[in-house]
Amino acid sequence: MNMKIKNDYVEKLNIIRDKRVAVVGAGPNLVSVNEISEDLIISADGATNFLYEHGIIPDIIVTDLDGISVFPEESIYVVHAHGDNIRKLYKVNNMKIVIGSAQVFPFGNIHLFGGFTDGDRAVILAKLFKAKEIVLYGMDFDSGYVGKYSKPYYEQNLPANWVKRNKLKIAKQIIEQVLSKDL
């Protein structure tokens, strides 16, 4: 496998600095998004598919590879590899600029930005790299549903199971804390 983590592209994330940033998640309310007017777009995993369908190319894509099925060449990818997605790592070969992300013990060109889900990791990146403003789209933590764009094989919004509801609860707490602080 041609792993693209040979180079450290983390400095490319400085495009976030002083920009109005849209962070787009794959929640059920994503389908109601008609326009994104911010300077820069960071999509969380499966939200990339929705954006691409609507002719929008995210500047940065944060993914653990389980929701994304399109790979715009122009985008910067922040890829979080973990034990549950080892079989999906082949998707990295479709990406031009890849920045590796870890939740614990970074090494080499793998970075520890923080975060628990792709969505909150995207918000953390926007905050860490000094976005002027962060606007959330498709971040529906409380509906009890998982958006149909969360996984490529979902055909509709689905009820969130106990594990997913708890993941969303943690993600919401992380985002609220990050947005309320200066980093």
Image (tube, rainbow, N blue to C red):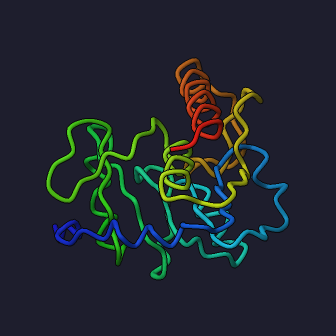
Residue farthest to the front, as pictured: 182
Residue 159 image position (x, y, % from top left): 69, 28
Task: Locate the N terminus by quadrant.
Answer: bottom left
Residue 94 image position (x, y, % from top left): 35, 74
Whether residue 157 is situated above or below residue 108 in the rendered picture? above
Task: Name the residue located 56 percent from the left edge and 45 percent from the top edge.
Answer: 119
Tell me how many marks there are.
0
Residue 14 image position (x, y, % from top left): 45, 69
The reply, left or right, for residue 104 in relation to residue 6 is: right
Whether residue 116 is situated above or below residue 12 in the rendered picture? above
Comparing 44 with 112, the one in front is: 112
Task: Name the residue located 36 percent from the left edge and 73 percent from the top edge.
Answer: 95
Residue farthest to the top, as pictured: 162
Whether residue 53 is situated above or below residue 48 in the rendered picture? below
The reply, left or right, for residue 113 in relation to residue 131 is: left
The reply, left or right, for residue 110 in relation to residue 52 is: left
Comparing 113 with 83, the one in front is: 113
Task: Name the residue located 28 percent from the left edge and 51 percent from the top edge.
Answer: 111
Task: Name the residue located 59 percent from the left edge and 47 percent from the top edge.
Answer: 150
Residue 102 image position (x, y, % from top left): 30, 44
Comparing 65 with 35, the one in front is: 35
The image quarter in which residue 4 lies: bottom left
The reply, left or right, for residue 121 in relation to residue 33 is: left
Whether residue 168 is situated above or below residue 94 in the rendered picture? above
Comparing 8 with 146, the one in front is: 8
Residue farthest to the bottom, as pictured: 74
